[in-house]
Image: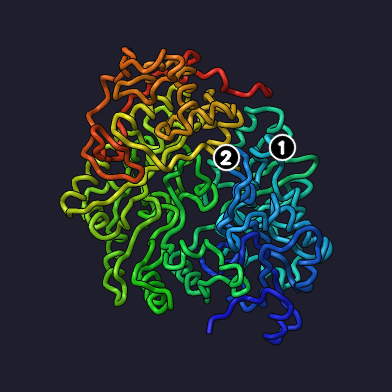
Amino acid sequence: MTDFLPVSKEDMVSRGWYSYDFLVVTGDAYVDHPSFGPVVIARVLEDMGFKVAMLAQPKWSDASAFEAMGKPRFGVFIGAGNLDSMVAHYTAAKKPRSEDFYSPEKKAGLRPDRATIVYANRAREAFGGDMPIIIGGLEASLRRFSHYDYWDDKVRRSILFDAKADLLVYGMGEYATREIAKRLKRKVRPSELTDIRGTAFITADEKPCVFEKISLPSHEETVSNIKAYADATRIEYEEHDAVRGRALCQSCQGRTLIVNPPAIPLTTEELDEVAKLPFTREVHPMYEKAGGVPAIEEVRFSVIHNRGCFGACNFCALAFHQGRMITSRSHESVISEVENMTHHSLWKGYVSDIGGPTANFRHPSCEMQKEHGMCANKRCLAPTPCKNLNADHSDYLELLQKLREISGVKKVFVRSGIRFDYMLEDKNDKFFSDLVKHHISGQLKVAPEHCIDSVLDYMGKPHIGVYERFMDKYSRLNQRFDKEQYVVPYLMSSHPGCTLSDSVRLAEYLQSRGRQPEQVQDFYPTPGTISTCMYYTGLDPRTMKEVYVARNPREKELQRALLQWKRPEKRRLVIEALREAGREDLIGFDKKCLVRPDAARSGGYKGNKNNLPAQKSKADPEPSTPVKITGRAKGMGGKTAKPTTSTRNVPANKSNSPANKAPSGGAARKRGK
């Protein structure tokens, strides 16, 4: 029978343990499921024969919660949880979140801000200076170098300095964890663990580095000079490759941070072994009185079939964490996991997701990267697909077909995001057809993000014409199979490069097609992304050219309001935004207008239509074939508008020129040269 890992001394005694080997600390509640990173690390250690205990969301006001577990023999592994703790606690507007889905009862505040640092220091206090302390997980991984911190609005040094840990594990940590644990058992000192891929450590100088290396601008330089910061970001991304990447050295306050090259991605066989670890796939019973942990509901009957993402959106941290090279589990492994699900007491016949970072990636984007690594200065998909791209869904299609045939399975859904541009590159339509016919649970998640090509270039996304083609095809397939299926389009406001005028044009586009998007995300400058570098420096690190940035909270609020112009509570913000952008032609009674004017300013409603019509680009295509989306608007005569999520191909104008910049924003920060 599969058991939970011990969470107290009493649990250990009940197992006959009077000592244990490793303590794993996490900022999330203890959910024994493979989608929770710290739990995977704990199960890997257990699989190696070690005695492992879990300490989930410990009280951090003092070290007593750590001391209560007793001192482990070999070391402590610490992670903030599945999210950066600051992202878990605060919205993009820096307002405290009221809920935390990774905590019992969705209760907020059960982990500290900057949880990795706090936990590591409490562990050191509890267990002494000779206890090996290893930090990892998403928070540590994305803060491994000097990084801009949105909440402090400054550049912070590597998290390893503040955590005072011995090692940092970045990326997917199974390989590094195994190497570290084996050597610690042999009494190798942490200071001697300098040759493990996927790790970082602090030394006096660069001499202990055993890999080919390159020096980054120092921490002090990144603080004082925005160009140095942007250059460091560029190098970090270019060298983040398991095949050709070099070690990176960054001096800080008289010491040196050494970040070894990334770990080699696990093979299919190794991923299968991880999937076979004895996860209970349940919330620990200690949370029963609190009603459990909500995060389990999304993943209880889902399967992660792949790792990595070569989509490489600039605002997404996945490529900098998991890497761009795709690895995937075998069909047999995924089938076995689903078969086991069918015996669960809550099973109702539905697999909620066969996904991952990007659901429809099953193999590397091209054959050459296996020998030469990923291209340093090129993207696989955006702005246009690489000529060497191997767009083939046949393996994923075959896997989904096999899963549909399992006894007890009624439906197999794909609910993770898909890359529609990659799907269009596949010359065989069979996967697209099967996706629409069998695998959509009422709505499909896709991410056009914007409709202005210049903004999409800064995002690292395909141009909007690609999305138009996808939606046309999606519509035809739904009609063929007599399906009434929705699309959830993700849109983003205030991304670097997006002006107030650009947001007006996006709202104008949505209005022209009778849509009201529900999924609007204000750009969130999280650690470790290219877009965050743009936000902080006002520079695109790929070109070192200036980028317009909406930093003023009011402008960010106006940009977001424009994408939700139909909401009554946003009306005054929309009017303010249109006036500031010089687009009062969209305030009036014409069907192309976004809002009606204030009665006081218009002299009362007299039926006039505000004679200036909304401008339409000659290059704008006609609307694509309609497909329903969530958040659809009511059209003329009270009828439901023909809903679709395609966005017209608005050509990039000089939206980044000074004349079009909102006065509340700005380009490069006036720091350094």
Report if residue 132 is visible in the image: yes
Q: Nearer the viewer, residue 345 or 300?
A: 345
Instruction: Tell me whether circle 2 and circle 1 mark residues in contact (CB < 8 Å).
Output: no
Q: Position of residue 112 (x, y in %)?
A: 70, 53
Going by the picture, which residue comes out furthest to the left?
Answer: 480
Residue that appears at 66% across and 39% down: 151
Q: Quadrant of residue 286?
A: bottom right
Report the residue marked by disc 1: 219
Q: Position of residue 672 (x, y in %)?
A: 68, 23
- Look at the image and tell me in which quarter the C terminus lies: top right
- Up the image or down, 329 lies above or below 640; here it is below
Question: Dot 2, crowdedness within 10 Å: few (<14), some or many (≥20)?
Answer: some
Question: Dot 1, crowdedness within 10 Å: few (<14), some or many (≥20)?
Answer: many
Q: CA distance from mark 2 to mark 1?
A: 26 Å
Q: Is residue 8 left or right of residue 365?
A: right
Number of marks? 2
Q: Earlier in the sequence, mark 2 or mark 1?
A: 2
Q: Position of residue 373 (x, y in %)?
A: 46, 49
Report the residue marked by disc 2: 92
- Up the image or down, 393 lies above or below 284; here it is above
Q: Is residue 305 left or right of residue 616?
A: right
Report if residue 467 is visible in the image: no
- Up the image or down, 103 lies above or below 345; here it is above
Residue that appears at 72% across and 73% down: 186
Residue that appears at 72% across and 80% down: 10
Residue that appears at 35% across and 40% down: 386
Q: Position of residue 583 (x, y in %)?
A: 41, 17
Residue type for callout 2 = Ala
Residue type for callout 1 = His
Mark in the foreground, 2 or 1: 2
